[in-house]
Amino acid sequence: MYAQNDNTAPRGLRGWWANPPRSGMRRIIAPWEYRRLRAFARVRIAAGIVLVGLGAVTLFGGSFSAKAVGFAALFLVAAVASFSYAAWELAIVRSESART
């Protein structure tokens, strides 16, 4: 009678975080993001492009003053971080595709 309602899904925060099963550094990525890695990587690439544009506008609009160079460097460092995280996510997507 109760066998039809057998729910073997993981319960609690630990069970939720472990679904889908991941190993190593991939556990840093949230599960809802891990299921859509390619889409999140594309969003990060778009954000990196916007940050590069903001850095260029800040640099040229500020006439290469010290303050403008500082803010442009801040935007460009954020863009590099965004691009590198997106590349890492795309590497995970490629390695998952190769295993299946």
Image (tube, helix red, strand yellow):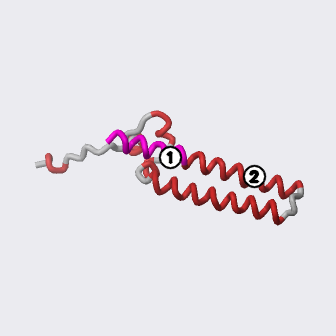
Give how far across and how far down residue 17 sits, in percent.
42, 43
The residue lying at 68 percent from left, 58 percent from top is 51
Secondary structure, mark 1, is helix
Q: Which residue is mark 2?
A: 74
Q: Is residue 80 magenta?
A: no
Q: Residues within 10 Å of mark 1 (few under 14, many from 20)?
A: many
Q: Are marks 2 and 1 in contact (CB under 8 Å)?
A: no
Residue lying furthest left: 1
Give the dominant element type of the magenta stretch: helix, strand or loop: helix
91 drawn magenta: yes
In this image, 87 relative to 12: left or right? right
Residue type at numbered disc 2: Leu
- For the C terminus, which image quadrant? top left
Seen from the viewer's position, the closer of residues 32 and 67 is: 67
Q: Earlier in the sequence, mark 2 or mark 1?
A: 2
Q: Secondary structure at mark 2?
A: helix
What type is the residue that disc 1 sits on? Glu
* Residue matched to label 1: 89
Left or right, 18 with respect to 53, comes to left
Q: Residues within 10 Å of mark 2 (few under 14, many from 20)?
A: few
Residue extent of the magenta highlight: 87-100
Residue at screen point 70% across, 62% down: 53
Residue 78 at x, y percent in the picture? 68, 51
Is residue 60 shown left or right of residue 21?
right
Distance (Cα) linking label 2 and label 1: 23 Å
